Image (cartoon, rainbow, N blue to C red):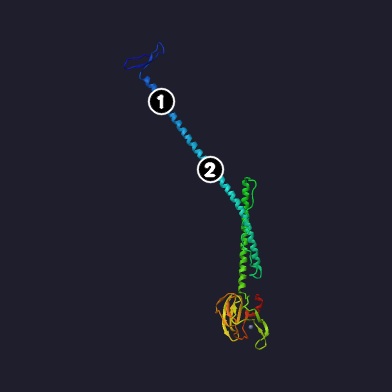
Amino acid sequence: MKHVGRRRRQLTFMLIPDANRRIAQWKIPMIALYIVPCALVLAVAVASFAVYSRFQQIQVDRAAMENRLSLQINRLQQSQDEKKDRITELQNQLIDLSSQADQFKERLDRVKELESELGDIANTSDALSGLQLSALDGAGGQAAQEQIGGEALPVTERSVDLLADDTRNHFNQLSTELESSISNIATYEQIILEKQHQARITPSIWPTISHLITSRFGIRRDPFTSAPTFHSGLDIAGRQGDPVYATADGKVTFVGYDATHGNHILIDHSGGIVTHYMHLSRILVGKGDEVSKGDKIGLLGSTGRSTGPHVHYEVIKRNQPIDPTPFLKG
Ligand SMILES: [Zn+2]
């Protein structure tokens, strides 16, 4: 190797393989001596930078991935906590529901008592007696606040399932019982309403304020002729102008005057029952009027075939006069 020339400096590489063979030689410009190492250094630097950049990128990606995972774990944890809270809340609601079923049972027992009382009333001969139902006062509806305490043992899923089943069965049973009670009560209500209606259309009160019977139903000596005659009603003596009442709900079918009955009124109570009020000094209703038991329909007098102020009161059943006395109360 030697330097050749000043201007064009070169390096010459020679290869001498053997004495008899040709010498191989290469000339390389001197400048290559600087460029090649520089290029090598540059290449290494570029490669290092690339590796470093890639490494940095991997680090950043890893950090981001870790971040995402951490967020997801947090979210899962939070969701699990929320689910746990929700399960606890549901379990508590189930316990409340179970205790409500017990309270409901107490109220249902009260309804059954009332049902039984109603049944008794519906089955008595008089709908108006025994109507003194003890009021549904809500007694037993609120369970007393008990003093509770003791060890707090965690519940198992099995015990919660059992409680849920029990509660469901309890409510189903109560619901069935309630349906039955409602059906019975509706039946009793119909019976009682019918009995009340019957009571309203049955002549059962005195036709005036006086209760002084001067002539009963049946065969008697006629006050005018003294001959035995049939008296088809009750004579109740009173003061002139005393009120005369409708003895049951009904419809006025006749008002008028004749020499025998004087001013008189007929009321049809349906079911083949009619009442007849005679010898009135005044008539206060018109034909076709609907009247209620106890309504004032006229004033007591002595018109027609009468010896003094009284009301002749008749009850007619299927066109036959019957004795009103057994119906009269008090
Ligand atoms: Zn009479």
Residue 68 falls within the magenta-colored stretch: no
Quadrant housing the N terminus: top left
Tell me the residue at 54%/41% (across/down).
77
Give the magenta part as a residue range.
76-81
- Amino acid type assigned to the residue bearing label 1 in the image: Ala
- Extreme-top residue of the structure: 19
Q: Eyeballing the image, is 267 above or below 55?
A: below
Q: Which of marks 2 and 1 is nearer the N terminus?
A: 1
Left/right placement of residue 280 relative to residue 12 reads right
Give the distance between the C-alpha atoms of the residues marked 2 and 1, in whole angstroms: 52 Å
At 41% from the left edge and 23% from the top edge, which residue is drawn? 41
Indicate which quadrant contains ligand 1.
Answer: bottom right
Q: Which structural element holds mark 2?
A: helix
Residue located beneath label 2 in the image:
78
Q: Name the residue under label 1.
A: 43
Mark carried by residue 174:
none
* Quarter of the figure that contains the C terminus: bottom right
User: Dominant secondary structure of the magenta stretch?
Assistant: helix
Among the 4 quarters of the image, the one containing residue 309: bottom right
Q: What residue type is labelled 2?
A: Gln
State the image coordinates of residue 127 (x, y, percent, origin top left): 64, 70
Left or right of 195, for residue 58: left
Residue 6's place in the image compared with 137, above or below, is: above
Q: In this view, does 90 lie above or below 258?
A: above
